Image: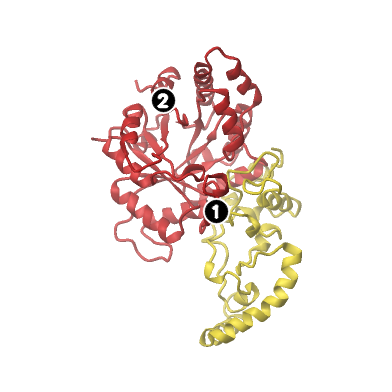
Amino acid sequence: MHVERTLRDAIESGRFIVTGELGPPLGASPDSIRKKASYFRGLVDAVNATDNQSGVVRMSSIATAKVLLEEGIDPIVQMTCRDRNRLALQSDILGAAGLGVRSLLLLTGDHMTMGNQPDARPVFDLDSVQLIEVARAMRDGRFMNDDEIKHPPDVLLGGAANPFAEPMGLRLLRIAKKVAAGADFIQTQAVYDLPRFERWMAGVRDLGLHERVKIIPSVLPARSAKALRYMSERVAGMLVPEDLIRRVEGADEPAEEGLKIACEIVARLREIEGVSGVHLTPVMWEKITPRLIEESGLAPS
Amino acid sequence: MDGGSGNRFSAWLDDLLTRSPRFARFASGAGLVIENAIKVPLFRCQRCGECVLSHTAFVCSQRCPKRLRNGACGGTRPGGYCEVYPERRCIWYLIHARSRTLARIAMLTEILRPHQWSLEKTSAWLNVFRGREEPPVWRVRSIVDRLDRDAARRALEEREP
């Protein structure tokens, strides 16, 4: 199937970027990927394929990305430093690019103690800042040891940012380093605390980073108060304000309320100077994506 | 260190130690007796062999469970506590706080190169003297220099959550 919309197009055209996210299957069958692809096709610019997210083993993100390409979707391959050393990371970058992947999201990775196989050996040979630098050097034609790469990988480089951890200065240092290392776009943790996100964006603008990278905050529609609470407690780096949880809890139809909240957040984000798009990550609820895009006004005209 | 007696000495030392790996191991071990005696109690040194203490306000960044050399991961908990060890503060939280106190925030804007794991558990001091420890900053890429200095400095020193 032909890939119609791509992240690169979106960035170059200057339009408001919309990306989605897909959790790879917990088994060897790619059927669920093909099924979920229909929620995104034609509606988003690209879809992230996560990499053993939260330390839970799933199909590899590169394999998932290959299936997404076959289904006509531009994948963003997520790559963490948790499970692979520098040899495997450089090799995977070549492999992903060779299969047609054109965007990478380079992350440190949630520690394995957060997952369901906590005794795995932590690798963390590189950190995400170094990995972005390595990927950029590879794109320019050099391996880490300065050997020449005959066919350099042509990929957009993304980093993650968490505007909600403290202190603010340290979070700004972190994103500034990723931009300096060569990131083209930055996706953030799910936004629920808008005032805090606005403060972080003010710092990002002070550093001039919004002009050098595309800032793409995440929006996570929750289908129940239980889901919100689970994420707030178990997912690294995520914080949900109590009044939002209570709002979903008290609603007649919690899923509808969750969707409504997500649309409100998207509307607020679009007004913030320096925000270049949104990243929609309905965890375990990918099928709400078309409705979310429609109801928050993100549908392609 | 530019060319001169410093470089000649480290070239000589490195040559000597490379020609005799047994002596190199002995020298590293002997050096470590003193190095560890000082750095472990004072800094909880993790014996990485490639010391960047001076870049991180003399707080050992390798105490981080993810061995991060360029700042905190996205998993820090409210209050600045570690994702992996929630009972203690994120080490980069401490590094940022002390860098502010010591006015060394600018040093945190440099990108530190990947750790040379082949130096793990060897004497960092010996590695410096024999020229094995390349400059810890990887193609110096300071970010504050490229931006408006005042606004950038203020943003990076922000202690409020």
* Residue A186 place in picture, x, y as percent: 49, 40
- Give coordinates of residue A56: x percent, y percent: 48, 44
For residue A250, what is the image quadrant?
top right
Q: In the shown orientation, is residue A17 left or right of residue A194?
A: left
Identify the image quadrant of the C terminus of chain A. Answer: top left
**Rendered location of residue A135, percent (x, y):** 42, 53
Q: In this rendered view, identify the residue nearer to me: B103 or A117.
A: A117
Q: What's the distance in space between the residues labelled 2 and 1, CA to CA?
A: 35 Å
The residue under label 2 is A289
Q: Residues within 10 Å of mark 2 (few under 14, many from 20)?
A: many
Residue lying farthest left?
A: A1
- Classify the position of the N terminus of chain A by image quarter: top left
**Residue A153 visible, this orientation:** no
Which secondary structure lies at badge 2?
Answer: helix
Q: Residue at x 73, y 53 (%)?
A: B98
The amino acid type, in three-letter code, at marker 1 is: Asp
The correct choice, above or below, for A209 with respect to B126 in the image is above
Q: Colour of chain A?
A: red
Which chain does the numbered disc 1 sit on? Answer: A
Q: Colour of chain B?
A: yellow
Q: Earlier in the sequence, mark 2 or mark 1?
A: 1
Residue A84 seen anywhere in this rendered image of the structure:
yes
Residues at discs 2 and 1 in contact (Cβ within 8 Å): no
> What residue do we see at 63% from left, 39% from top?
A165
Labelled disc at residue A119: 1
Q: Residue at x 56, y 71 (%)?
A: B119
Q: Is residue B62 toward the left or the right of residue A187 in the image?
A: right
Query: What type is the residue that disc 2 sits on?
Result: Thr
Q: Residue at x 50, y 19 (%)?
A: A255
Q: Position of residue A249 (x, y in %)?
A: 60, 19
